[in-house]
């Protein structure tokens, strides 16, 4: 299991949050990894416990839709998701990080989100449009892309708001949509933009003033 911690483990008081950054692909030291690292550094410098999990290293397959979990059984898929469940459950904030691939989040991150199905619980009176209960977490979105048009992130943001915020019911703590990080064929160029500084500040201030 490849998991990284950003910064020293610190004493957990009410202002110290457990932050799980899920890196949904991208190059090993690509734009998205650099963005996630900058966010994690800011959050760790603010005193939070930060863990980064890369879905390139921890294999998480998409949901099979077998519904075994709806009959009290553990997920039939024996992959990395099961090992991530304790970190998911103890996280106050889950940060979803992905390159923009064909105008949306990566398939690896989508597969990870699908597997939340097996940690949902029965809810007697679910809100309109939902069938089950999910643990309540804060959420944030970090993305990188080559393009930087006003519509570049429309699909990805729509999915994040629809699935993570409105459906699963997480509290949105914000998004950093890092457009203009270099062309698809070239080297990562995020270090030539302001996005890493923005990500550091985003991480540092995400719980400021609470
Ligand atoms: C398969 C593939 C699809 C991509 N699709 C898009 C896209 O739809 N829009 C865009 O602006 N950039 C697209 N890109 C560019 C990446 O989003 C961009 O280079 C990103 O920063 C790569 O992240 P990484 O350096 O972490 O790998 C694509 C790249 C690849 C490899």
Image: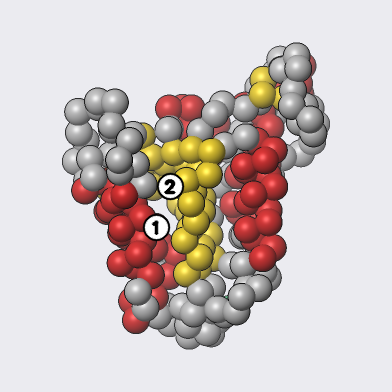
User: Is 136 rendered above or below residue 104?
Assistant: above
On the picture, is 4 further left or further right than 157? left
24 or 61: which is nearer to us? 24
Asked whether residue 14 appears in the rendered view, the answer is yes
User: Is 76 rendered above or below residue 207?
Assistant: above
C-alpha distance separating marks 1 and 2: 7 Å
Quick one: label 1 or label 2, which is nearer the N terminus? 2
| Residue neighbourhood size for the residue with mark 2, other residues' Cα within 10 Å, grouped as few (<14), some (14–19), many (≥20) | many
| Residue neighbourhood size for the residue with mark 1, other residues' Cα within 10 Å, grouped as few (<14), some (14–19), many (≥20) | many
- The residue indicated by pointer 1 is 36
Q: Where the N terminus falls, by quadrant?
A: top left
At a point 56% along the width and 26% down the height, the residue shown is: 135
Q: Is mark 2 within 8 Å of ligand 1?
A: no
At a point 28% along the width and 33% down the height, the residue shown is: 16
Q: Where the C terminus falls, by quadrant?
A: top left
Asked whether residue 57 appears in the rendered view, the answer is no
Mark 1 in CB contact with mark 2 (< 8 angstroms): yes
Callout 2 secondary element: strand
At a point 30% along the width and 43% down the height, the residue shown is: 208
On the picture, is 163 further left or further right than 11? right
On the picture, is 10 further left or further right than 89? left
User: Is 152 rendered above or below residue 168?
Assistant: below
51 or 171: which is nearer to us? 171
- The residue indicated by pointer 2 is 21
């Amino acid at each position: 299991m490849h998991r990284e911690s950003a910064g020293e483990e610190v004493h957990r008081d009410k202002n110290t949050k457990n932050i799980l950054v899920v890196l949904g692909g991208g190059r090993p030291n690509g734009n998205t990894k650099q963005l996630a690292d900058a966010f994690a550094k800011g959050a760790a410098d603010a005193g939070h416990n930060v863990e980064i999990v890369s879905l390139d290293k921890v294999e998480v397959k998409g949901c099979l839709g077998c519904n075994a979990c709806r009959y009290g059984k553990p997920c039939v898929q024996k992959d990395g998701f099961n090992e991530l469940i304790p970190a998911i459950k103890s996280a106050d904030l889950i940060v979803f990080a992905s390159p923009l691939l064909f105008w949306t989040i990566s398939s690896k991150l989508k597969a990870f989100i699908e597997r939340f199905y097996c940690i949902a619980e029965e809810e007697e009176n679910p809100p309109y449009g939902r069938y089950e209960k999910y643990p309540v977490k804060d959420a944030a979105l970090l993305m990188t892309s080559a393009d930087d048009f006003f519509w570049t992130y429309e699909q990805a943001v729509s999915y994040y708001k629809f699935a993570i915020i409105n459906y699963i019911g997480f509290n949105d703590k914000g998004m950093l949509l890092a457009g203009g990080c270099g062309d698809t064929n070239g080297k990562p160029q995020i270090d030539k933009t302001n996005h890493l500084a923005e990500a550091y500040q985003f991480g540092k201030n995400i719980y400021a003033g609470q």
